[in-house]
Image (spheres, rainbow, N blue to C red):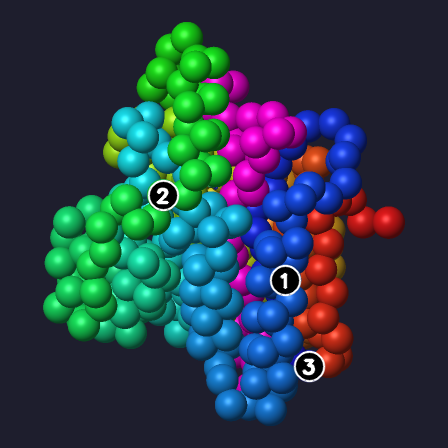
């Protein structure tokens, strides 16, 4: 059994209004990467780790997602991105925090995983590392799209207290209005032919986040987790996922023999909720279970399973 699941962010309150004109490229991106990587995973030409790295890179390339190009803007109107990746069989991991000049933050996180030490680098230190590893730096402006500039202006004009860190005040980028909608974070989880698992997550964070704010995405055990039983990537209000150690809690739940992944993930979303958490997660287990639950209006999501690609945005039918 080989599985690849992806998400492109979750958010919103109330009923789903159906796809927006901005959704087709997002769906096309997920379908294209799943159609490309799924068969390669099935024939054994890429590992679970490669699959999640490549899946996240493809979504970092799609301006409609909040990762890489198209990342949301912080309080100062700049992009700063976080990413992490983890390999289940040995617990190797890598993460970058607050990078501004990397086209693909997940590539730098993957480099750290391969290198073995250190696990996490931030800001210029991460960018310098990426250069030493042969990655090119880009101008921060090259990552900023018109949509994100418009969202940021709307956020700025609506806010009385820019920089507030209260969770109730922190706006998921999806919540800023129908006419300027924008989905979030991207992530991928995979199970390969050898039964190995991996997870990866990448984000620009939240519109208007205070400069220097770090969410769950780059924190192993909060936004990303993979071990020998399960791989998890989360999306939602990062502070709540951090406080719940959400992704790791899925790993803890799956330690019981015969555990039901769906029940375990529901329980973890229950843990996140009291901390002001709204969002979802995707998870695959070594015994072939896969779930993509969310507790908000929508979660961009896609799955490659048994040779078939499926994608969705709103609630399951
Ligand atoms: N979890 C991300 C963060 O808090 C945001 C998201 O998933 O939409 O930075």
Disc number placed over residue 122 in the picture, else none: none
**Does residue 67 appear left or right of residue 303 in this picture?**
left
Q: Which residue is mark 2?
A: 144
For the residues labelled 1 and 3, the Cα–Cα distance comes to: 25 Å
- Judge by depth and name the residue closer to the eye, 259 or 136: 136
Locate residue 91: give its quadrant. bottom left
Write the residue at 43% across / 14% down.
Answer: 157
Residue at x 65% of width, y 57% of height: 27
Rounded to the nearest angstrom, the CA distance separating label 2 from label 1 is 21 Å
Disc 2 element: loop
Q: Which residues are magenta?
A: 168-197
Q: Position of residue 181 (x, y in %)?
A: 58, 35
- The residue at which mark 3 appears reads as 1
Residue underneath mark 1: 28
| Spot occupied by residue 280 in the image (x, y as percentages of width and height) | 62, 44
Classified by dominant secondary structure, the portion drawn in magenta counts as loop
Left or right: 295 as drawn, with respect to 218? right
Q: Is residue 267 visible?
A: no
**Sequence order check: which comes first, mark 3 or mark 2?**
3
Contact? badges 3 and 2 (CB < 8 Å): no
Point out the tag, 2 or 1, that comes first from the N-terminus: 1
**Residue in the image at 52% along x and 43% along y:** 184
Q: Earlier in the sequence, mark 1 or mark 3?
A: 3
Instruction: Report if residue 181 lies within the magenta region.
Output: yes
Identify the secondary structure beneath mark 1. Answer: helix
């Amino acid at each position: 059994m080989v599985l690849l699941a992806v998400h492109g962010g979750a958010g919103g309150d109330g009923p789903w209004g159906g796809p927006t004109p901005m959704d087709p490229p997002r769906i096309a991106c997920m379908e294209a990467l799943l159609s490309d990587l799924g068969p390669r995973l099935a024939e054994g030409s890429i590992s679970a780790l490669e699959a999640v790295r490549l899946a996240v890179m493809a979504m970092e390339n799609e301006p409609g997602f909040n990762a890489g190009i198209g990342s949301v803007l912080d309080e100062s109107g700049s992009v700063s991105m976080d990413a992490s990746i983890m390999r289940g069989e040995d617990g190797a991991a890598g993460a970058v925090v607050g990078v501004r000049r990397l086209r693909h933050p997940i590539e730098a996180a993957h480099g750290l995983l391969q290198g073995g030490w250190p696990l996490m680098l931030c800001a210029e230190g991460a960018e310098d590392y990426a250069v030493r590893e042969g990655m090119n730096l880009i101008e921060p402006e090259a990552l900023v799209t018109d949509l994100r500039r418009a969202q940021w202006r709307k956020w700025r004009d609506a806010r009385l207290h820019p920089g507030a860190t209260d969770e109730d005040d922190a706006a998921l980028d999806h919540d800023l209005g129908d006419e300027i909608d924008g989905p979030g974070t991207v992530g991928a989880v995979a199970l390969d032919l050898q039964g190995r698992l991996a997870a990866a997550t990448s984000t620009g964070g939240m519109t208007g986040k205070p400069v220097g704010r770090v969410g769950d995405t780059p924190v192993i055990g909060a936004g990303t987790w993979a071990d020998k039983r399960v791989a998890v990537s989360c999306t939602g209000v990062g502070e709540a996922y951090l406080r719940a150690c959400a992704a790791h809690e899925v790993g803890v739940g799956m330690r019981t023999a015969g555990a039901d992944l769906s029940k375990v993930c529901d329980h973890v979303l229950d843990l996140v909720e009291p901390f002001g958490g709204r969002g979802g997660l995707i998870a695959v287990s070594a015994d072939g279970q896969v779930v993509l639950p969310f507790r908000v209006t929508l979660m961009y999501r896609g799955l490659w399973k048994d040779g078939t690609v499926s994608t969705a945005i709103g609630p399951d039918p």
